[in-house]
Image: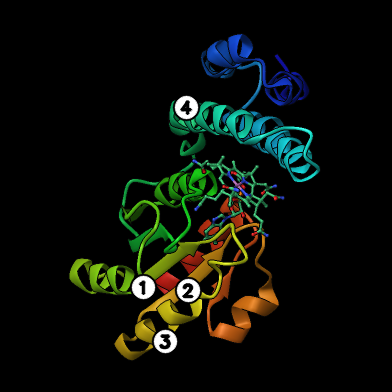
């Protein structure tokens, strides 16, 4: 199975095919046909981009996107050991991760988590719909050096500024990410930025070891 095939099957959103897709991909990765990262990045993430565009144009609807999201989260879970394979054993630091208040998108956040863990960072995952106070209080309690906040809605991006204001008082660094964000936006609120999960891990390592 190639990453292109994964992308095509995933973007067709046929429930019967989606039901078996994550385990088929796992088998392909286990047999060495492709790497876990290829399966995720060139297969599922590209497919999700396509679904997202069709959702925007009104060619697919919320139930279909929800089925796709469920499939993708299942695939992320199964592929986890193959994504974290190049990580080390020693703990590099602690990160508190979550999706901001009012936002329930968690696929990207879950991929970021795997990439950070793969690089030896202990991740405290607060899930979705997380208030600025919860981010900062947990970071203090866990002795985290960094807060990682995800947002997929333009309406919830503003919450990130509140996290930065609270975190700044406590000397905790904040890294933000998610499809609608940009480096300029991050800079304007005093946060660090990474465009994807692999870059997020690089930036997190730099911040935790600086
Ligand atoms: C899947 C999806 C859903 C699923 C979410 C399921 C889930 N468990 O996450 C469901 C169906 C539930 C959903 C609901 C809604 N959605 Co939606 N959804 C999407 C979709 C199609 C894909 C998002 C996704 O998972 N992408 C794949 C992942 C891998 O990419 P990613 O999240 O961007 O993450 C990568 C990077 O951004 C980065 N990253 C992510 N987080 C972080 C964090 C840090 C710290 C760092 C450094 C990096 C980083 O790394 C990741 C991996 O490389 C997008 C369209 C799109 N193209 O983005 C719309 C989209 C985000 N949704 C949208 C909307 C409007 C909604 C709803 C309001 C719809 C409605 N009318 O109810 C609701 C909101 C519910 C809520 N309160 O959250 C809009 C947002 C528009 C806007 N400008 O604000 C989009 C853009 C679709 C559109 N074009 O209209 N959605």
Under tag 4, what secondary structure? helix
Please tell me which residue is depicted at 42% across the width and 64% down the height of the picture.
101
Work out whether residue 69 or residue 177 is closer to the camera in this orientation and state it: 69
Q: CA distance from mark 2 to mark 3?
A: 10 Å
Q: Quadrant of residue 154?
A: bottom right
Please tell me which residue is depicted at 53% across the width and 66% down the height of the picture.
156
Q: How is the image coloured?
A: rainbow
Residue count near mark 4 (Cα–Cα under 10 Å), binned few <14, some 14–19, many ≥20: some
Residue that numbered label 1 is attached to? 132
Visible residue check, residue 14: yes
Q: Is residue 107 above or below residue 142?
A: above
Q: Is the residue under label 3 in contact with that under label 1 (CB below 8 Å)?
A: yes
Under tag 2, what secondary structure? helix
Q: CA distance from mark 1 to mark 2?
A: 7 Å
Work out whether residue 134 or residue 28 is closer to the camera in this orientation and state it: 134
Residue that numbered label 2 is attached to? 159
Under tag 3, what secondary structure? helix
Mark 2 or mark 3, which has the lower sequence index?
Answer: 2
Residue that numbered label 3 is attached to? 165
Residue that numbered label 4 is attached to? 74
Mark 4 or 1, which is nearer the eye? 1
Q: Is the residue under label 2 in contact with that under label 1 (CB below 8 Å)?
A: yes
Q: Which x, y percent locates residue 37?
A: 61, 35
Residue count near mark 1 (Cα–Cα under 10 Å), binned few <14, some 14–19, many ≥20: many
Mark 3 or mark 4, which has the lower sequence index?
Answer: 4
Mark 4 or 2, which is nearer the eye? 2
Q: Is the residue under label 3 in contact with that under label 2 (CB below 8 Å)?
A: no
Residue count near mark 2 (Cα–Cα under 10 Å), binned few <14, some 14–19, many ≥20: some
Q: Which x, y percent locates residue 144?
A: 29, 69
Marks counted in the figure total: 4
Under tag 1, what secondary structure? helix
């Amino acid at each position: 199975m190639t990453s292109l095939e994964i992308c095509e099957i995933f973007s067709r959103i046929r429930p019967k095919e989606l039901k078996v897709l994550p385990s088929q991909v796992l088998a392909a990765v286990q047999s060495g046909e492709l790497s876990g990262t290829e399966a995720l990045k060139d297969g599922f993430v590209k497919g999700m981009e396509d679904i997202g565009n069709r959702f925007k144009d009104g060619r697919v609807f919320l139930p279909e996107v929800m089925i796709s999201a469920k499939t993708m989260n299942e695939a992320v879970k199964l592929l986890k050991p193959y994504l974290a394979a190049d990580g080390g054993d020693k703990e590099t630091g602690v990160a508190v991760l979550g999706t901001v208040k009012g936002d329930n998108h968690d696929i990207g956040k879950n991929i970021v988590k795997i990439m950070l863990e793969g690089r030896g960072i202990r991740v405290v995952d607060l899930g979705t719909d997380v208030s600025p106070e919860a981010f900062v209080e947990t970071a203090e309690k866990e002795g985290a050096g960094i807060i990682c906040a995800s947002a997929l809605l333009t309406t919830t991006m503003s919450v990130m500024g509140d996290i930065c204001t609270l975190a700044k008082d406590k000397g905790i660094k904040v890294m933000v990410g998610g499809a609608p964000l940009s480096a300029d936006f991050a800079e304007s609120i005093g946060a660090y930025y990474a465009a994807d999960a692999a870059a997020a891990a690089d930036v997190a390592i730099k911040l935790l070891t600086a």
